[in-house]
Every structure is written in structure tokens, then in C-alpha cells.
Amino acid sequence: MPFVTTAKNGRYEIRESRNTPAGPRSRTLASFKELDAETIEKAQARAEAPLDPVKLRRAAQRAGAPIAASGVDAAARELLARLARGEQPSPMLKRLLLDALGSPEREPVSDTARAASEWVDATLGERGEALADLLRLADALPLRRRPPASEFPHLHSRAA
């Protein structure tokens, strides 16, 4: 049964456990910094039993390991980020993209998701810097102190 664990050097390992006469043992199938298709193939080649890539990615997520985006996902992130910055494809490419992606059951996209689209291609460093800026802004906002007591009269209940 394969699992993902953190190694001592900050990397991650795909390991396989098995029972032996001396008790349970595990061995490393592959070591990685970011789980990608090549790492999964390497682990598959060394594994005694077939590996499920979907379950392996879930195990990596649970372990906190970064997972590489597929080529299509990376291209979609780059396209969304460029569109969010105001760039537009040519009219013919736009029609071809809409045709290729279109489905009759398209769900509307919220304004929040649309506003976040410029961040889908951001690196972890860019996201961290934006978070630090946001925290500095929050620290700079003045606090509004509440009065110690309410100016409204107290309401008392009467027995009915």
C-alpha cells in the first residue's frame, strides 16, 4: 500500500509498505520536491502492486506536498492570468476556445472567482508577498474604540 511522507531534507517520498516475516516494512519508491507525472511513473516502475495516480495525488495533498499542474492546467492558468490583465486572443481564437470549452450546462462564474482569476498563475512567492502587504495594511488601519457601555436603555422581561 503506497503512502507519501516527508523526508528529513524537506523533500517528500512515495513509500510502499508490505508485510514480511520480520514484520511490516516500507521502502522508498520515489523522492520528489513536487509531485509530477514523471515521479509517479518512476514510483510505478518500482512498486510491487499497481499504483492509482489519483489516490497518490490525494495522499501527496494530505502530506502537504506540492503537486505539479498538468500541461493543460498550466496553459489555462496562464491564459486566465493574461485575460485578467486585459490581454485578448484574436477573434478567431476566441471563437475556437469558446467552442472547445462550451457546454450546454455552463454554470455562471461569480464575480469573486472572476476577480481571483488574475492570481491563478501567481507563484507562491507572489502570493506570499501579497499576503504580507495585506497584513501590513490591516496593521496600519486605525482601531475604532467602542464606548464602554451602551447608550440604549436596558430591556427587561416581565412575567406574562
Image (cartoon, rainbow, N blue to C red):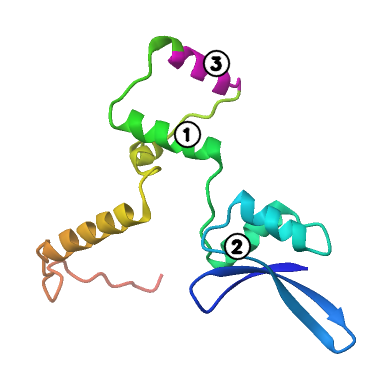
Judge from the rendering whether residue 71 lies leftward or rightward of residue 54; answer left or right: left
* Vertical order, 131 against 26 (above or below): above
* Vertical order, 93 against 73 (above or below): above
Disc number for residue 76: 1
Q: Of the residues tagged 3 and 2, which is closer to the observer?
A: 2
Q: Position of residue 151 (x, y in %)?
A: 12, 68
Image point 55% across, 16% down: which residue? Answer: 99
SS of the residue at dot 2?
Answer: helix
The residue pinned by badge 3 equals: 99
**Which comes sooner in the sequence, label 2 or label 1?**
2
Task: Bin the neighbour count of mark 3 within 10 Å (Cα to Cα): few under 14, some 14-19, many 20 and up.
Answer: few
Magenta stretch, residue numbers: 93-104
The answer to whether residue 46 is magenta is: no
Q: Nearer the viewer, residue 140 or 133?
A: 133
Q: Of the residues tagged 3 and 1, which is closer to the observer?
A: 1
Q: Position of residue 44 (x, y in %)?
A: 74, 57
Give the residue type that dot 3 points to: Asp
The residue pinned by badge 2 equals: 60
Image point 68% across, 58% down: which residue? Answer: 56
Image point 17% across, 69% down: which residue? Answer: 153
